[in-house]
């Protein structure tokens, strides 16, 4: 009788676990479909925010998408500024990734989740070029309230695709080497010690403004394991923008939304 009872419990647990996994897989599939649509504010950005919550579970799916060569021009961009922008309103949400390409869109989220720098950030668009753009078109902006953007000196689409294949292979290799030991806390620590400005920028943005919970990141763990690294970094960091981020984070506090409060 006891054996039958235990078997019932065991099979029940297996069923519930399987059901939970299937439900999660369906949810992720649904979000990935939304992530590949055209509307930035209607589909892509909301899906991105939800997908980020799955942390390492979503990484293999994003790596698969890195090989997708589809071009899906964004719509519903409003004041979004990105390499595919055609109209600039003098302000907006700045994303230096060529999001019209599914592979780069996936690379954007992959780098946000992992705090790695796989090379998907568009080197043609940065704060300096954006400032030049604003200054160079200031009179037109004053007259029209917006101005057309001509992104020059782009490589051919074919060269971009070939280059991104290399990036995707590098990301795939990285995951094969790290998937067994990867977690987001270790990723944060690694990024903070990386001396890579892109990685540092992403990790500070997450620590200050992150919306997705970091598994096992308690307030105590942040104080004892993460904050000391930041304090040490303040003494050695050479990047002015990162130095500013360090000061702001130490003067304020870590985003409560990323903490795993039991």
Image (tube, rainbow, N blue to C red):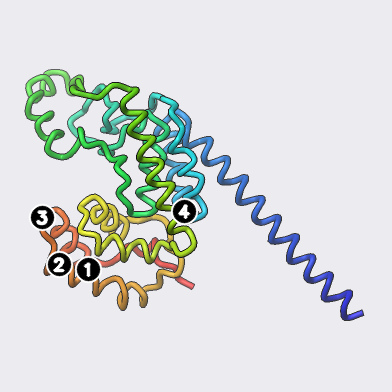
Task: Specify the quadrant that holds the N terminus.
Answer: bottom right
Task: Tell me if 217 is positioned left or right of 94 in this view.
Answer: right
Which image quarter: residue 132?
A: top left
Instruction: Give coordinates of residue 74: x percent, y percent.
Output: 38, 27
What is the x, y in percent for residue 56?
A: 48, 56
Marks 3 and 4 sit apart, C-alpha to C-alpha, by 34 Å
Distance CA(mark 2)–CA(mark 3): 11 Å
Badge 4, how many Cα within 10 Å: few under 14, some, many 20+? few
User: Which residue in the protein does label 1 denote?
Assistant: 230
* Element assignment for label 4: helix
Mark with earlier residue (3, 4): 4
User: Which residue is denoted by mark 2 in the rendering?
Assistant: 234
Residue depicted at x 43% and y 63%: 183
Question: What whole-number distance in Å separates the C-alpha atoms at marks 4 and 2?
Answer: 33 Å
* Separation (CA) of disc 2 from disc 1: 6 Å
Cβ atoms at labels 4 and 2 below 8 Å apart: no
Determine whether 117 is above or below 237 in the image: above
**Badges 3 and 4: C-beta atoms under 8 Å apart?**
no
Nearest to N terminus: mark 1 or mark 4: 4
Q: Are marks 2 and 1 in contact (CB under 8 Å)?
A: yes
Which secondary structure, mark 1? Answer: helix
Percent x, y of residue 173:
42, 49
Between discs 3 and 1, the one toward the N terminus: 1
Give above or below for 50 relative to 8. above
Residue under label 4: 176
């Amino acid at each position: 009788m006891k054996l039958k009872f235990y078997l019932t419990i065991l099979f029940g647990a297996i069923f519930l676990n399987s059901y939970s996994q299937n439900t999660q897989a369906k949810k992720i599939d649904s979000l990935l479909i939304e992530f590949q649509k055209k509307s930035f504010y209607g589909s892509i950005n909301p899906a991105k925010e939800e997908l980020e919550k799955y942390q390492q579970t979503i990484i293999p799916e994003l790596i698969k998408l890195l090989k997708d060569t589809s071009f899906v021009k964004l719509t519903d961009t409003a004041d979004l500024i990105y390499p595919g922008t055609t109209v600039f309103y003098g302000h907006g949400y700045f994303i230096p990734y060529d999001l019209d390409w599914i592979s780069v869109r996936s690379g954007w989220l992959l780098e946000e989740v992992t705090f790695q720098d796989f090379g998907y950030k568009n080197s043609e668009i940065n704060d300096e070029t954006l400032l030049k753009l604003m200054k160079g078109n200031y009179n037109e902006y004053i007259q029209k309230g917006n101005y057309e953007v001509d992104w020059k000196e782009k490589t051919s689409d074919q060269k971009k695709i070939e280059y991104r294949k290399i990036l995707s292979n590098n990301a795939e290799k990285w995951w094969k080497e790290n998937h067994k030991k990867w977690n987001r806390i270790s990723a944060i620590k690694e990024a903070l010690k990386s001396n890579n400005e892109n990685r540092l920028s992403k990790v500070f943005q997450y620590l200050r403004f992150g919306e997705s919970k970091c598994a096992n990141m308690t307030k105590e763990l942040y104080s004892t394991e993460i904050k000391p690294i930041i304090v040490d970094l303040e003494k050695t960091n050479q990047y002015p923008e990162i130095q500013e981020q360090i000061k702001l984070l130490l003067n304020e506090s870590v985003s409560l939304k990323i903490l795993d409060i039991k």
